Amino acid sequence: MRTPADSRADAQRLINALSAPLPRDDARRADAVQSALLDSGLLNRDDLGSSPAVAAAARDGLASLAHLLDARVQGQGGGRLLLLLLAERERFTPHPAPDEAELRIRGAASALLHLGLWHVDDTLRLLGGALQVHSEEARDGAGGDAPSPAPAAGLVPVTPGLSSDGGELHLAVGAFDADGALSVCGRWLSERVADASGSVPPRCDTCFGQSAQRPALIFTGEEHDAWTAFTEAHRGEEA
């Protein structure tokens, strides 16, 4: 059974194998990332040519990178990995700003998702599977002492908050720590709002379920239920 320590070692080998600049050509880039998975031990040479096996190795690589981030963000490596990838896609600087080590982790994760384009229909599902693997390995590695996903929607916090511009009211699903939280629409929230029905800015249509999420945020089942329950309860209220 893989442990978080095993995964961190795999992640470091993968990052080292990806240290050279990747080719610009898509096919050659995918081949280079696949070779890095071989060097890291996440992919067996016998599995070359098998899309399910390569996709599974990419998933495990993403999970390993989340484990590597755990030590830097107090066990919240999965969320930090999501934030780093979203920041790269949407071209904003996350808070706190990533250092060189985190940029290398993000680069490796982006390379794995690029490889996934050749082997799966939906790279968001690939990333979601990786975060699930990361969560399960972290829980098993803690001997069962790590918290399991909340058994009911009401146990997952949904917190209204404001981004730095304060132009709209957003929602964060999950932990809202001292530094803030990532909203459903991908903004970094730095300020909680105690009462979403009081005198606050207009609501973000994406966070409150009035428009589609692009890209869609990956929820666990319990998080999705909590978010749905919150938005249903506040539907029709004046912001």
Image: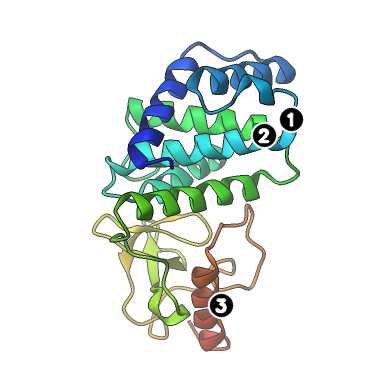
At a point 57% along the width and 28% down the height, the residue shown is 111
At a point 74% along the width and 19% down the height, the residue shown is 27
Q: Residue furthest front?
A: 1
What residue sits right under mark 1 in the picture?
Answer: 50
Name which quarter of the figure residue 44 lies in: top right
Which corner quadrant holds the N terminus?
top left
Gap between marks 1 and 3, in whole Å?
A: 38 Å
Gap between marks 3 and 2, in whole Å?
A: 35 Å
Report if the CB atoms under discs 1 and 2 are less than 8 Å apart.
Answer: yes
Name the disc covering residue 194, or none: none
What residue sits right under mark 3 in the picture?
Answer: 228
Residue 36 position, x and y percent, is 55, 19
- Taking depth in this image into account, of 100 and 225 the one nearest to the observer is 225
Gap between marks 1 and 2, in whole Å?
A: 5 Å
Q: Image check: 223 left or right of 123?
A: left
- Taking depth in this image into account, of 133 and 102 the one nearest to the observer is 133
Residue 6 position, x and y percent, is 38, 34
Which is more N-terminal, label 2 or label 3? 2
